[in-house]
Image (cartoon, rainbow, N blue to C red):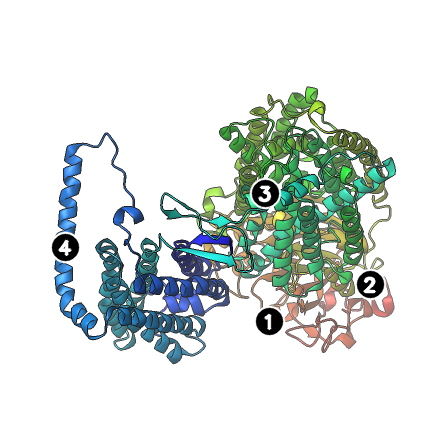
Amino acid sequence: MTTLCSIPAGWIPRAHTVIAYTAFSSALFIGWLSGLWKDLCINAVARWPVEWFPSVSATIGDHASPRAPFQILIALCATPRFLLLLLQWLVHRYPPSRPPKSSDTCPTSEGSGATSALKEARVRTRSVDHKLEKEIEEVLAPVDDPLRVEIGSKALVDIELFVGIARTFCCGGWVYITSRDHHDLHDLFMILYLILTLPWMYLSTQNSLNATIKRKRRIPFFGFMSMIPPLIWLYYRHSVMHIPGAYTYYSLFEWSLVVWDVAFDALAVLELGHLQIAIIDTSSSTGKGFIPTQNGTTNFYLVKSSPIAQKQELGADWTAEIHSPSPKWRHFVAYVSDVYWSVCFWTVFTSLGFQLFYWSIWKLALAGSELALLANLSGFLLSNKTAYRYITSRSGLLHHRAVAVICGMGCYLFPWPAVRLVGVSVGTWTGWLALFGSWARLKGSEEMIAEAQIIALGLAITLLIKYANHSTNPLWAISHAASGGWNKTGLLLAAISMTEYAQRPVDLYPASPLSSHPGKKDHASPLVVIPEFRQRIVAVGLGSLIHLIQTFGTDAGTILSWTWTGYPIRGPTLHPFAGIVISVISLGILNQSRATRDVSTICGAIGAVTLYRYPDWIGFFGGLLLAFYLMSIFPTYLRIASACDPGPVFGYALVTKILLDVISVITAAYAFVPMGWIFRERTDLVLGFCMVSTILGWFVSKDLELPGRNSIPLRSQRRIQSTKRYTIISSMILSIISVGYSYSKIPIDKPIPYYPDHKIFSGGIWTVHFGLDKEGRDSQWRMMQLIKEMQVDVIGLLESDLHRFVYGNRDLSRVISEELGYYVDLGPGPNKHTWGAALLSKYPIINSTHHLLPSPHGELAPAIHATLDIHGQKVNIMVSHNGQEEDLLDRELQTTEIARLLRETENTPTVFLGYLVTRPGDLRPWPYQILMEDGRMWDIEIEDRRRWCEYIAFRGLWRIAYARVHESDISDTELQVGKFMLPKAGHPVHYQSNQELYWHIGEADVPEPWHMPSMFRGNGTRGHQYVVWDGPLYYLPPARSGMQRYGQHWSVYP
């Protein structure tokens, strides 16, 4: 017989304790993180804030987000639970020949320097403990001794096992039958569980092996019993006396029962130190049938492979040198395959942010999905020897690449956002493992530069793909055929790439340096010994570098959005300067000269400061310097990191990256995050920390002597040469294509209004919810279709600033503006910490100014005040997004500022398109009255009482139509559109009364150009239909306007 594997029995109670505590604590934490805390505190008597702490039953059963992970963990806890029952029964029924002493279970060491006084104190303490123990035994003796005489010791142990099993089944009853599923049955199982816990604890204590263990088990036993009387009294006060607040204190005692209960079972580890759980091969006639121990303590044991198998495995090393090198064409094919794999990696990696943010934007709070960021932490697995061997093996690299593509990109097929989130999370986890596996093998080799250049080139290609596809990666899981996705093509190319990788000759894989052969040890020995302190600095620097690349290097328009200031144009525009950004990033990959490293570092630091502090051209050139620096230092940084201990360095690097990701979002989302005010508008801190840590990490490692050409195999030297040659050619071609394509995108034709010959225009407002619909898909093409069909000439888009990692670094205006033809003002950029406001106009934008409205408490409110040239007449447009309902002072101050800006141009025709959060007719301090009276504006329809967020107001124009169109599942807010007519020369707009202002007229009685589309009447189309009324409302200007029949029979004259 051969012992294949054995584990210490003490691992079982430890696993039970960890899983159980994790299950309950995670349910409580996720309940808070999901924004459900107030809901969990609600009961039949009172609600928040009278009840301020949730019960165990409510936490684990009332809502899906905390219930699901809790029940999964409790299911995982079942195995160690039943094993614990079996082991405790065995050790109590068949005690060891020498019961474990206290020194065996809880060893203490008395150093040579211990004083005699200390020893005497310990003796006195032990004597007191023994006296207390004897007193407790005297109290329990009248109960315990008759039982043992009447029933027998072994029978008591059997009863203990039966009670334990029955108690476990009752636990499953109240865990999986929640109070909402069946309240009475849930309570019945919980009461039975509590009743059975008392004999379970009593028998387990009395059947323990020695007095020390008994004494320690009595602590949680008595702690548990002491909680029950106040628990019953508080429940009586809640359920019978109906006293508000009593249930909160009941809940605290209920949670304490959980703590004492799990702690009691955790002490079983004291009795199991001499036991081992073994898996024995009974078919083997030879081998080891014993379980090894050390100093009398059992250890984990796993049978070793035979020496012959080890030699065969070593001889089959897939990184060994081969006699006939691969031809050049095969090098090129492998290079193209690796570059495309890097495109797939960046696709999956950049899609994780908005996949997890989907729930946050629909809840406007932390939703728990943010935990998906932990998918970046797979690097810690490299600290485990077994995992290291697999991750760095040929099959491990192939499997991780395949899983990353299948899960991260193939999940687009599923219509459920949760499934896509899981798929992208798995893809991100395995994608990093595929990269880390290659990097860990290289151990600082010069070949690491070639690997990093391939990864960086894939990023540059991704930039071009996004730019060509309206700032959206067509391979993302949010894309599909209806939104312009290339998913099937991307998966087909990925399958070809995986096939090539599986069939690739061994000399085209990365190889370790000559003195660090990975087949000789579980962890290849590094050629350079780097102090741990330096490795930690490198890890933080690498995480900061990845965050910076993710922020500024994953979309060609991000740097431009940081520097945009409006009209007249004073800086670079998207076309053609996005191509310049891609070109600079591509060329930065080639700058690997050590002689220029100090200069490029200084330029990068200057570029970061310039980009943050200066707009327009100066900021743009600073952004180019920063982008060039990031890409030039990226390969060198990865080479340094690969020379370090891979598990901690790659793991902590991504921990740093995650923390920076979260903080960068909090700089704008501080109003929705506990303690978020600490990082309010502190992008300067994030950017400064990233730059300092990146530079510091490079500085402390620049003097390292990493493996050079003499320390790497010939196959690596050939691969370095071919990769360098192909990267130079590819970067140059990519730069030329990017610049040429961006110049071809410069608009030649001017946008044409929907009624170019009539002095009529339409204005709309739409809160577009960051371009993700309710299915978590890219909604830009559907938005464009509705705007086109509604014939909107001027539209304000809110929640439109997507140049952050949680939105995928996108430009929400591009599909609409480029497909339909609009002038665009993006509004305040991501460095202004707002959710964004954009203005799209068919008419030339003469001037526009960006404003950050007063926000002393809540989220920052953006506004655009623009002047348009509409049929030769200046018309002002105000687009704004006020704060939320919770911040009344903010909204009052913001609306007051808007009114002031509007009042300054009182004699200019104006349309307000904004988000107010108020009811029609609300008085001060609510925004409605402030805007209409102080801003000298008219509400577009005073009888539309169902508004809350979006409002249209006007002055100096004849309003002729108004409609609200249902958003379908594109957003959470409808599209509002108003139609306006310019006044006749010499006939200023003046309404004498509300009756004249809101005089409705039928569609058949107005000229044709006044009409709004009829396709949205009734059931509409694609889920879009007119709401509130059966169709648009039409208004007839007074006779003195001279415009009542304007446009009749399509006439262009009044």
Residue type indicated by callout 2: Pro
Residue type indicated by callout 3: Lys
Q: Is residue 634 left or right of residue 205?
A: right
* Crowd class of label 2 (few under 14; some 14 to 19; many from 20; radius 10 Å): some
Residue type indicated by callout 4: Leu
- Asked if residue 564 can be seen in this view, the reply is no
Query: Relative to the observer, which residue lies in front, 908 or 397?
Result: 397
Q: Quadrant of residue 789?
A: bottom right
- Distance, label 1 to label 3, CA atoms, is 36 Å
Q: Earlier in the sequence, mark 3 or mark 4?
A: 4
Q: Is residue 290 left or right of residue 876?
A: left
Residue depth check, mark 4 versus mark 2: number of the one nearer the observer: 4
Q: Is residue 786 left or right of residue 526?
A: right
> Which numbered disc covers residue 1054?
2
Secondary structure beneath dot 3 equals helix
> Which numbered disc covers residue 832?
3
- Residue linked to disc 1: 943
Is the C-beta separation of discs 1 and 3 under 8 Å? Answer: no
Is the C-beta separation of discs 4 and 1 under 8 Å? Answer: no
- Residue linked to disc 4: 132
